[in-house]
Image (cartoon, coloured by chain):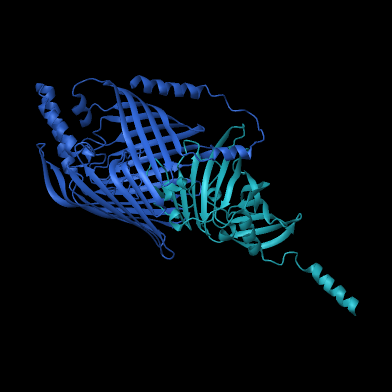
Chain colours: A blue, B cyan
């Protein structure tokens, strides 16, 4: 598998570098309508995907709690390199009202632990669409609910987004889902109902929640007075009951507002004492998001979102955790006893392993489409601020697509924060990543 | 006496406009001559850079009524499946990776290059513009159009229309500041069947992107009346299945 994936990636890269240069002339375009008609001819199947190479350089923070838990007193130097190769394969088949879709993601990584590889069936489902008002799907599917760009409190049946890459495809869950759609004339233009049946057994959806359970979720969508509104509900054996709503509306032609609110009942809310012990108590918690998307006259798009995670740990709990890691590390360096560091690591996995584990965050992104008349080039900057401890990440990004189906993305991430803050205690201070992706 | 009356009537006929219809009525006819009210079509978009490098996109679109249009990219692979839906001033973008449609501002671009939403998600001209003035210019009709609302990408448009075929030959698009944003040239009139005879090619150049040109080639334009449910958020990821 490793060799095949590495070989395919290298072959694709060689093909790219061997492509002939463009013709440097202002030639008149030529086209043949019959050729275009051949191009648009519908085939019952389609195959596609991408191959990517993604080297990453981490600038390590040896005083960070995450570094100390992971590497203890190993001197790993100032930087760490990682080489990632990826392959996505997508295929679909359609015959009449029936269809099938498949997406696999394969990765090969070389990091400080050597080589590792993974193949995931990200999506694979059958669908039936007897008419545009009714669509039934059965299989593994990524269902995304919510209006937020970086966070989705109402995404009850999907995996959490990577806030550093919120537009990347996620792995789905096995489910049976349907869409029932009805259109109207008047203030209510669309009404759509989406029920989801999601089982959890020993062999499927194990990581969703408690096993041997059946879960039911539903979404009611309305396009009402030019506003998107969703009412969502989840109940079942694997997670506690939760409900919520979201909305999105264009207030002006260049200004959009969106929001989400979710209430999770009987949530296991976590607390961490000064001695590093974890306590949980059940309570109902509220998650909320409010965001805007604003486009300026020179095509700069701002996305700003405030996210409140009512189930996240508080600032004092986080501080207690980081102090406990300091203490555990001191014990380790003075006595060689690593048991407390192991405890800290377990505690981290239970309380802080989520992408955004604390209570309040601000997400800001500005992207400028094709500045200075450079076509297919989009620079952007993103910052995520933890509003409790004021630590933050700052990420400049450059995306350029010089040729059809070829995309370069250069991404930097710089983490800033004092002692005992979320971003100040991460494993690295900065990260520089280049992603070369070729679609086929 | 009879001769005098005849002369007066003759002079009145000469003074009367050749097109008794209003500019708005002409504009509506131009719209219907370009596309049926409910239709499907394919478009190949070609961006040509000053060094001759080209980028090509193929889109499939369906439209219904005055304000509903959905489009999906069929190629290249990097854009495949990216779909947009417009219902009046509401606009959504579906990116397959993201897995759900997101509401975008109606002026947002959905892909790179010279094309913008106004080109890709254009509604009828008569739905978006009023004709303020119509005049004769070089054996053609020149319509001076003004956007009905501020949400339209081009504030003012000058449209040259072939008076016999009632099809546009050239369109100049202006910003509210009066700056020329782009010029569209309609070429190669072709019979698409079903009585639809229209230009198969629109060439575009823009003083904002000097040396760059874009070409839009139309294929498979035909009348198709789809249910309203096709033009909804939940159906957007499946638009390509309508083909």
Relative side of B142 to B13, left or right: left
Of A429 and A108, the residue lying toward us: A108
Of A280 and B39, the residue lying toward us: B39
Residue A374, horizontal then vertical, whole percent: 53, 37
- Tell me what residue is drawn at x 45 percent, y 36 percent: A46
Up/down of A304 relative to A16, above or below:
below
Residue B12, horizontal then vertical, whole percent: 81, 71
Res A185 → quadrant: bottom left
Relative side of B240 to A429, left or right: right
Relative side of B156 to A357, left or right: right
Residue that extends furthest to the front in the rendered view of this protein:
A96
Up/down of A334 relative to B184, above or below:
above
Of A182 and A343, the residue lying toward us: A182
- Tell me what residue is drawn at x 45 percent, y 58 percent: B228
Residue A159, visible in the rendered structure: no
Res A245 → quadrant: bottom left
Count of residue discs: 0
Residue A119, horizontal then vertical, whole percent: 31, 29
Residue A355, horizontal then vertical, whole percent: 26, 39
Residue that extends furthest to the bottom in the rendered view of this protein:
B1
- Tell me what residue is drawn at x 64 percent, y 57 percent: B30
Of B200 and A243, the residue lying toward us: B200
């Amino acid at each position: 598998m490793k060799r095949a994936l590495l070989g395919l990636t290298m072959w694709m890269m060689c093909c790219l570098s061997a492509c002939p240069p463009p013709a440097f002339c202002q030639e008149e375009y030529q086209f043949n309508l019959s050729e275009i008609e051949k191009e648009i001819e519908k085939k019952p199947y389609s195959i596609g995907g991408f191959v990517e190479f993604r080297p990453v350089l981490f600038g390590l923070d040896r005083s960070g709690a995450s570094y100390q838990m992971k590497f203890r007193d190993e001197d790993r130097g100032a930087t760490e390199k990682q080489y990632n190769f990826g392959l996505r394969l997508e295929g679909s088949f359609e015959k009449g009202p029936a269809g099938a879709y498949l997406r696999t993601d394969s990765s090969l990584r070389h990091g400080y632990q050597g080589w590792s590889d993974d193949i995931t069936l990200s999506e694979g489902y059958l669908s039936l669409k007897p008419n545009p008002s009714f669509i039934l799907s059965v299989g593994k599917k990524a269902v995304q609910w919510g209006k937020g760009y970086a966070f989705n409190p109402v995404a009850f049946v999907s995996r959490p987004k990577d806030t550093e890459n919120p537009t990347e495809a996620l792995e789905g869950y096995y489910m049976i889902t349907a869409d029932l759609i009805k259109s109207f004339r008047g203030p209510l233009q669309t009404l759509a109902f989406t029920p989801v049946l999601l089982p959890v057994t020993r062999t499927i959806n194990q990581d969703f929640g408690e096993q041997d359970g059946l879960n039911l979720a539903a979404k009611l969508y309305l396009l009402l007075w030019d506003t998107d509104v969703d009412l969502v509900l989840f109940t079942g054996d694997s997670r506690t009951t939760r409900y919520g709503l979201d909305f999105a509306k264009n207030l002006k032609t260049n200004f959009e507002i969106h929001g989400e609110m979710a209430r999770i009942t009987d949530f296991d809310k976590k607390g961490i004492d000064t001695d590093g012990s974890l306590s949980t108590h059940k309570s109902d918690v509220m998650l909320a998001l409010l965001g805007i998307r604003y486009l300026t006259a020179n095509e700069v798009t701002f996305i700003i979102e405030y996210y409140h995670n009512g189930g996240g740990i508080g600032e004092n709990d986080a501080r207690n955790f980081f102090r406990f890691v300091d203490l555990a590390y001191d014990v380790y360096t003075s006595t060689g006893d690593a048991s407390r560091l192991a405890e800290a690591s377990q505690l981290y996995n239970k309380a802080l392993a989520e992408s955004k584990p604390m209570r309040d965050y601000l997400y800001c992104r500005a992207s400028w489409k094709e500045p200075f008349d450079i076509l297919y080039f989009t620079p952007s900057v993103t910052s995520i601020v933890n509003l409790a401890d004021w630590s933050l990440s700052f990420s400049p990004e450059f995306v350029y697509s010089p040729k059809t189906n070829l995309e370069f993305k250069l991404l930097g991430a710089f983490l800033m924060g004092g002692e005992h803050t979320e971003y100040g205690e991460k494993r690295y201070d900065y990260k520089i990543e280049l992603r070369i992706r070729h679609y086929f | 006496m009879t001769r005098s009356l005849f002369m007066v009537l003759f002079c009145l006929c000469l003074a009367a406009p050749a097109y008794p219809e209003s500019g708005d009525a002409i504009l509506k006819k131009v719209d219907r001559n370009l596309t049926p009210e409910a239709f499907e079509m394919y478009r190949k978009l070609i961006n040509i850079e000053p060094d001759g490098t080209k980028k090509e996109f193929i889109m499939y679109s369906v439209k219904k009524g005055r304000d509903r249009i959905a489009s999906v990219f069929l190629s290249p692979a990097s854009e495949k499946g990216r779909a947009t839906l417009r219902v009046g001033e509401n606009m959504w973008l579906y990116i397959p990776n993201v897995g759900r449609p997101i509401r975008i501002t109606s002026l947002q671009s959905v892909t790179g290059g010279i094309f913008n939403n106004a080109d890709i998600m254009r509604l009828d001209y008569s739905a978006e513009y009023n004709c303020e003035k119509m005049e004769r210019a070089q054996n053609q009709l020149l319509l001076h159009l003004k956007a009905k609302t501020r949400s339209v990408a081009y504030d003012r448009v000058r449209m040259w229309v072939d008076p016999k075929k009632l099809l546009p030959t050239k369109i100049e698009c202006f910003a509210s500041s009066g700056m020329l944003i782009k010029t569209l040239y309609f070429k190669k009139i072709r019979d698409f069947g079903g009585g639809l005879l229209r230009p198969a090619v629109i060439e575009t150049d823009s003083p904002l992107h000097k040396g760059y040109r874009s070409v839009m080639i139309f294929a498979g334009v035909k009348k198709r009346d789809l249910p309203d449910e096709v033009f909804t958020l939940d159906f957007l990821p499946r638009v390509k299945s309508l083909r």
